[in-house]
Image (cartoon, rainbow, N blue to C red):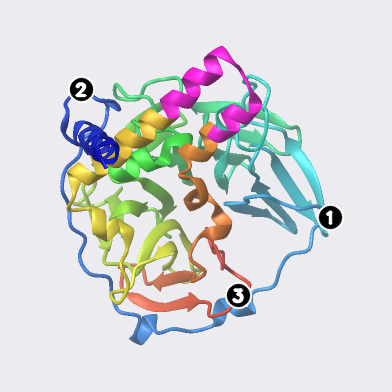
Amino acid sequence: MGLLLKLLAIIVLSIAVIFFAPGIPPHNLQFEAYTLESPLPLEGKLANNNILDKAEEIKVDREFQGPESIAFRGDEIFTGLIGGELVRIKNGKSTTIIEKTKNNKPCEGSWDVKNCGRIAGLRFGFDGKLYVADAANGIFKVDVDAGSVETLASCDVEIDGKRPLYPDDLDVGKDGSVYWSDASTVADVQNTLFEFLGSGTGRLIKYDPKTKKNTVLISSMHFSNGVQLSENEDFVLVTETARARVLRYYLKGETKGKSDIFIDRLPGLPDNVRPNGKGGFYIVLISPRVASEVSLVDLIGPLPLVRRFICRILHLVVASLQFVDSFFPSTVTREWIAYVQHVGPLGDLEKLPYKSIVVETDGTGNIIGSLQNEKGPVNATFMYFS
């Protein structure tokens, strides 16, 4: 009994130290309490439906892992895969356009995002070039016919004093301006959870093709994600995933240079946003939020000490594995590091909630419909195209 009490005391003391002691990494995160408003109920325009159950799979000649963003050119489909590859699909056949956007160290496996790259956003510009947001490397312009790559923004170069660690999505204006999201300035794509648990460092950035400079339009967003210009390019939308809302930044008129909330209280965490072809938008939700169920984001928002504790535990586990790998380098150890960084099974796309919701709005943010599933085959929707 005495030994058990001592062991229990050590465990309690260790938890208390990790919970309260100052100076324990990660040091670059801030933790402030926040509360999300209750999600909109799934009724009326958001009533449950099975429209997405009617989705048909596009047959291709190989297995694709993790395609998130897609772009069209005529009868061709372009997408990026886990591992950094950019591929073209035509008549069911796939062709590799580029292996990865940047020649880093050799890619050890799909888990090695830092060296493999991870294409998260794709758009064709009016110049016919394909613009790419690589979450590990930056913003690029690709000639899909020649296979050439031009860097527009690098994760190695600071913008307004901070490196863009997580380029996520983008859209291209008629004048060639590129509007893109930097999901975090404190956490890269391999440490996404740190941005979610922190207080928000995401940004909306504009690349000017004339000056070749990048300018921050909005900062301090809580995981800035999908980006979409309005039909007339008088404003640009950016989803703020961890706050279950979409922000609007004005590009023209009396409100030029200002931002506001386009829509909030979404019944899920917004990922990408795309036009619906009628002047409105489709907003893709990844993790549903419903009033009758407990949402992890809603639960931990008001608890900054708990969020800090989780980050400290995660950092200590990863640091311990990295220490082992420094003395005994092993691919297996590095795979485990990536597994822990992605919070084990919680980071597995196949294990996301089965429910998928795409919210449709008009051009002013009013909800006019939704697309949902009841039984499949869609279990994780990241982009919707009309």
Does residue 330 belong to the magenta stretch?
Answer: yes
Eyeballing the image, is 14 above or below 286?
above
Q: Which residues are magenta?
A: 318-336
Along the polypeptide, which appears first: circle 2 or circle 1?
2
Q: At 49% across and 22% down in the image, what residue appears?
A: 322
Residue 291, position as x, y percentages in the image: 28, 74
Figure disc tally: 3
Front-most of residues 295 and 365: 295
At x 43%, y 33%, the residue is: 188
User: How many neighbours does mark 2 have within 10 angstroms: few (below 14), some (14-19), or many (20 or more)?
Assistant: few
Q: Residues within 10 Å of mark 3 (few under 14, many from 20)?
A: some
The extreme top residue here reads 327
In this rendering, is residue 67 above or below 280? above
Q: Is residue 34 found left or right of 353 in the rendered image?
A: left
Query: Which residue carries the number 1 mark?
Result: 61
Element class at badge 2: loop
Q: Which mark is residue 376?
A: 3
The reply to whether the C-beta atoms of the residues labelled 2 and 1 are less than 8 Å apart is no
Q: Position of residue 277 (x, y in %)?
A: 51, 68
